[in-house]
């Protein structure tokens, strides 16, 4: 990372630290800001179309087959809704772990992309993006609008478009452009909606393909290109995340949670759960509830 890029991110960190002591959503800017002062266990999260950045510390994110350890030298673009398993692994003093998630407005992405010369659509690159100095500068100015709320109405749309422009000039452009290709993206979005609404129901690739009016091979290829997961992997993440929520928040037993999300075999559920979260379901739920009671993100 060059000196100028580092300076922009340093200033962005200072801005967020002055504003945030705990997770906070800034609706006017489409921002979700978070700050924690200790490592956290792996937990389930849903990432909507967004740009995710770490300004201090490091985290682990498991997205499909990608198991990533990353910090401020990289960023992550998620072009469609994705189930993610993630946790903080480093929270250095004095700032602790500081991160921001900025919601991508795909309508604005399409408008900016149409106004610039598009490169030929290539396969999506590696999951972690590399900062450029112009992107760090633009994103830093977007964050600094937190300190001038009276300017947000006028300046936020302009700066947001600049951030999108700078993103489209990075190595992540193919991933972003793939998300706004109308036909392919419609397929992926409709499949994610179907799987989310019918998490506990049985399905086949043939049924999914028929529902979105495409072939099984096209569905599988487009879905993996956009999410780095097969539909079955995606559904497994949804089921495990909902099962964990039911155990931690609703107090379901492991057997009740497994049945509620569509698992027919308790042993199969326990095996998948332990692979995802590192502990058996009941043990993890007890620990997560204790952490929440102590004010630690679970």
Image (cartoon, rainbow, N blue to C red):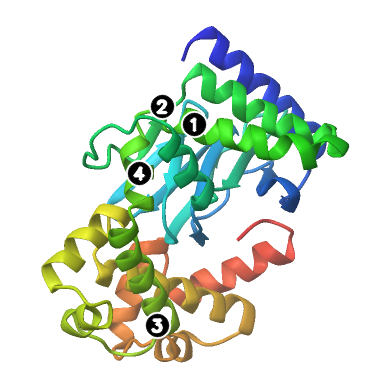
Q: Examine the rendering and report whether any part of residue 57 can be seen.
A: no
Tell me the CA gap for discs 1 and 2: 7 Å
Q: Look at the picture and state if 154 lies above or below 239.
A: above
Q: Is residue 111 left or right of residue 217?
A: right
Residue 258: quadrant of the picture? bottom left
Mark count: 4
Percent across and percent down for residue 57 are 57, 33
Counting residues from the N terminus, which is met first, the one under dot 1 or under dot 3? 1
Counting residues from the N terminus, which is met first, the one under dot 3 or under dot 4? 4
Q: Look at the picture and state if 59 lies above or below 171.
A: below
User: Which mark's residue is nearer the viewer, 1 or 3?
Assistant: 1
The residue that label 4 is drawn on is 177
Residue lying at 64% horizontally and 43% vertically, measured from the top left: 38
Counting residues from the N terminus, which is met first, the one under dot 3 or under dot 2? 2
Counting residues from the N terminus, which is met first, the one under dot 2 or under dot 4? 2
Label 4: few (<14), some (14–19) or many (≥20) C-alpha neighbours in 10 Å:
many
The residue that label 3 is drawn on is 199
Q: Look at the picture and state if 246 lies above or below 134.
A: below
Tell me the CA gap for discs 1 and 3: 36 Å
The answer to which of 37 and 80 lies nearer the viewer is 80
Residue lying at 74% horizontally and 25% vertically, measured from the top left: 14
Counting residues from the N terminus, which is met first, the one under dot 1 or under dot 4? 1
Of the numbered discs in the image, which one, if any, rests on residue 169? 2
């Amino acid at each position: 990372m060059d000196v100028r890029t580092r300076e922009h991110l340093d200033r962005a960190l200072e801005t967020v630290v002055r504003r945030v002591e705990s997770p906070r959503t800034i609706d006017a800017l489409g921002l979700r800001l978070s700050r924690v002062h200790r490592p956290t266990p792996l937990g389930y999260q849903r990432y909507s179309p967004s740009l995710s950045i770490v300004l201090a510390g490091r985290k682990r994110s498991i997205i499909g087959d990608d198991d990533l350890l990353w910090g401020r030298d990289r960023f992550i673009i998620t072009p469609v809704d994705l189930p993610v398993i993630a946790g903080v692994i480093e929270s250095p003093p004095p700032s602790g772990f500081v991160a921001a998630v900025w919601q991508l407005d795909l309508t604005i992405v399409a408008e900016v992309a149409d106004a610039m010369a598009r490169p030929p659509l290539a396969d999506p690159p590696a999951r972690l993006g590399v900062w450029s100095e112009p992107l760090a500068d633009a994103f830093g100015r977007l964050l600094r609008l937190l300190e001038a709320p009276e300017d947000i109405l006028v300046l936020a749309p302009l700066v947001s478009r600049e951030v999108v422009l700078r993103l489209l000039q990075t190595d992540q452009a193919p991933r972003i452009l793939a998300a706004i290709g109308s036909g392919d993206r419609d397929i992926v979005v409709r499949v994610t909606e179907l799987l989310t609404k019918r998490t506990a129901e049985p399905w086949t690739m043939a049924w999914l393909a028929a529902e979105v009016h495409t072939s099984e091979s096209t569905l599988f290829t487009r879905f993996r290109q956009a999410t780095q997961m097969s539909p079955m992997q995606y559904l497994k993440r949804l089921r495990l995340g909902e099962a964990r929520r039911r155990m931690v928040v609703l107090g379901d037993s492991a057997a009740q949670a497994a049945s509620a999300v569509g698992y027919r075999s308790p042993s199969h559920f326990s095996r998948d759960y332990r692979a995802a979260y590192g502990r058996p379901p009941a043990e993890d739920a007890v620990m997560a509830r204790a952490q929440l009671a102590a004010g630690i993100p679970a």
